[in-house]
Image (spheres, rainbow, N blue to C red):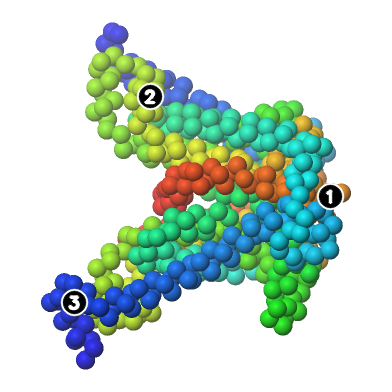
Amino acid sequence: MTLTLTRERGATTPTTPARPRRRTRGRQLGVYAALIVAGVATMLPFVWMLLGSIKPAGEILADPGGWLPHSPTLDNYRQWFGALRIGTYFRNSVIVAVVTVLGNLLFCSMVGYALAKLEFAGKRILFALVLITLMVPGVVTFVPLFVVVAKLHLINTYAGLILPFLTSPLGVFLMRQFMRSIPDSLLEAARIDGAGEVRIFARIVLPLSGPPLATLGILTFLASWNNFLWPLVVAQNQDRYTLPVALSLYSTGEQATDYGLLLAGSVLVITPIVVAFVALQRWFVQGVATVGLK
Amino acid sequence: MTALGPAAARRRQSYVAWLFALPFVAVFGLFMLVPLLSSVLMSFTDFRSSDVATPWAVDFVGVEQYARLFADPVFRRALANTAYFVLLGIPLTMAVALLLAMALNTGITRFRAAFRVGFYTPVVTSVVAVAVVWRFILQPDGLLNRALSGLGITGPDWLHSTTWAMPSLIAMAAWRNMGTLMIIFLAGLQAVPAEVGEAATADGATAWQRFRHITLPLLRPTLLLGAVLISVGYLQFFEEPFVMTQGGPLDSTLSVTYFTYNQFGFGRYGIAAAASYVVFAAIAVVSLLQFRLLRAKE
C-alpha cells in the first residue's frame, strides 16, 4: 500500500509533501548530531594538546586526566623558544621542506615533460623504472640509502637530509600523466615559431600545469615536514635536527615525563601545517583525491 | 634556426630530452636505483655495518639468509603482529571512513567543509606530535581511563599491556588515516548518480537495502582502491609503535618494518635487507591483486 502511494506521489506531484520533508529534516538533524559527536571525538586529542600545553608541570602530574588548566602559563612555550632552541629546528625543517618542494616541482616536471611530449632513446625503460619504483616501500631502500649517504659523507648535512627526497617517482608520474593532456598542436605551433624546447617548457607547459604542481607541492611539503625516520638517523647533531626529530628525542630523553613541555612542543610542530592545511584545504583535498584516484 | 633533416631533428630531440631528464636521473639513480640494487645483493649476504668500507669483502649467504630469518622467533612474532595490525586495522579504518563519507554525502550543506577539515586534520599532523598526546590520553590514570571509570569500567594500562597495546595502536592508526580514505570514498560516492538511490527509495527500499544493493556495488572499485592504498601503508606499519611503545611490551607491537629498523641498529644490514623484502613481497602481492580485481571489473 505505502509502496504504491509513494510511487504515485513521486510520479505525479513534483512538490514534496509535508510529511517526508519533516522526516528528511529529522534525518538531517540525526546526521548532524552524529557528525558533531564524531568531529568532537576526532579533535579531542588536539584540544587536549592545547590545554595541556599551558599547564605547569606540577599540575599535569598531579591530575593527568584533568581538563581545564587551573593556573594557565606560557612557561612551556617560553622554554622552547629559549633554552631548547626551537628556532634552529624550525629553520632546519623549513630549509629542508622548501628545497625539497622546489626540487620536486622543477625536476619532476622537467622529466615529466620529456616523458610526455618528447621522443628519445631509452624513454620506455626510464618510464618503466619510474613505475616499478612507485611500488617499492621505503623500508627496502632505507639501509643501503643510509650507506650511500654515509659514503658520500653527507651524514649530518642538509644535503643528506634533502638529496634523497629531491625527486620522486610519484611526482614524475603525476606530472607526466597531466602533461600528456596538453595538446601537441600548441607545442607544434610554438616550434614552428622557432621556440626551443626550454622556452616551450617554461612558457607554455609549466604555466598550464598549475593543478598537478599544486598537488605535488602540497604532498611533498607535507611528507617533508612530517618526515621523521630519515632525519632521525641522518641528523646526528642538534644543529641539524628537524622539528619532529627534536620533539621525539625530548620525549624519550630527560624530559620524557615533562608532559606540559612536550605538549607545547607538539603544538608548535603541528601549528604551521594545520594553518597551511586550513588555508589551502581545497588543494589538499584535491591532491589526495588525485593521487588516490590515479 | 636552419631546417634540420628528420634524422638530425630526432637526434637533437633525444639529446634535449635527456637534458630535461638529467637532474631526475642523477638523483633517482644514486638515491633510488643504487640502494635498490644493493638491497637485493645485501639481502643475500652477511653485510654488517663494519663492512661499509669494504663492501665487496662480505660473504655470500644466499637463500640461507631467508631461512635464518623465518627461523627467528622474533621475526615470526613481527610477522604475526603485522598481520594482526593489517587485518584488524584495514576493515576498521575503512568502515569509519565510509561512515563519515556517507554522512557527509547525505545532502547536508552547512558546515560540510568544516567537518571535512576536522576529520582530515589528523592526516596532516606529525606522528611524533600526536604520539605525545595519545600516550598521555592512554596513561593508566589518563583521559580515557578517567572516562571509562565514569562508566564503572576500570581501564587497563593500555600501552604497557601485551593485550591492549596493539589495539591502542590500531585505534590511533585508524584515527590518523580515516581522513584520507574518507576523501577518496566521498569522491566515489559523489560519482554515484542520485537518481538511482531516489528510484530505489520510491520502490520502497530501506536505507540498509539501498546501501547493501546500490551503494556498495557501485562503490566497489573505490573501496578496492582505498583498501590497496591503505594496506600498502599498513604493511609498513612502523611509526606508531616507534613513538608509542618502542615495539613493546615484550615485542607485542614489533612490526616487520620495526624489526628491520632494529637489525639496522644492530649493524646487521644483510638480515635487515632480507626482512624488508618480505614487506616488499607482501606489498607486491597486494598491488597485483588490485590489478587483477580492477581488470576483472572491466
Q: Are marks 3 and 1 in contact (CB under 8 Å)?
A: no
- Residue A260 vs residue B156, the one in the foreground: A260
- In the rendered structure, which disc, 3 or 2, sits on the residue that comes first in sequence? 3
Q: Residues within 10 Å of mark 3 (few under 14, many from 20)?
A: some
Quarter of the picture holding the N terminus of chain A: bottom left
Residue, disc 3: A10
Q: Please tell me in which quadrant of the rendered image residue A67 appears.
A: bottom right
- Horizontally, residue A92 falls left or right of residue A129, namely right
Name the N-terminal-most of marks 1 and 2. 2
Observer able to see residue A71: yes
Out of A66 and A168, give the one closest to the viewer: A66
Dot 3 amino acid type: Gly
- Residue B268 seen in the figure: no
Identified at 43% across, 59% down, the residue is B111
Q: Label 2: chain?
A: A
The spot of residue B178 in percent (x, y) is 53, 61
Q: Residue at (52%, 59%) from the top-left corner?
A: B119
Residue under label 1, please give it. Answer: A255
In this view, the residue farthest toward the front is A71
The numbered dot on residue A201 is 2
Q: CA distance from mark 3 to mark 1?
A: 66 Å
Name the residue rendered at 34%, 81% in the picture: B206
Residue A280 picture location, percent across and down: 47, 43
Q: Are marks 3 and 2 on the same chain?
A: yes
In the picture shown, does residue B252 fall above or below A249? below
Quarter residue B28 falls in = top right
Q: Amino acid at mark 1?
A: Gln
Q: Badge 1 sits on which subunit?
A: A
Give the mark toward the camera: 1 or 2.
Answer: 1
Who's the residue at 58% across and 65% down the image?
A41
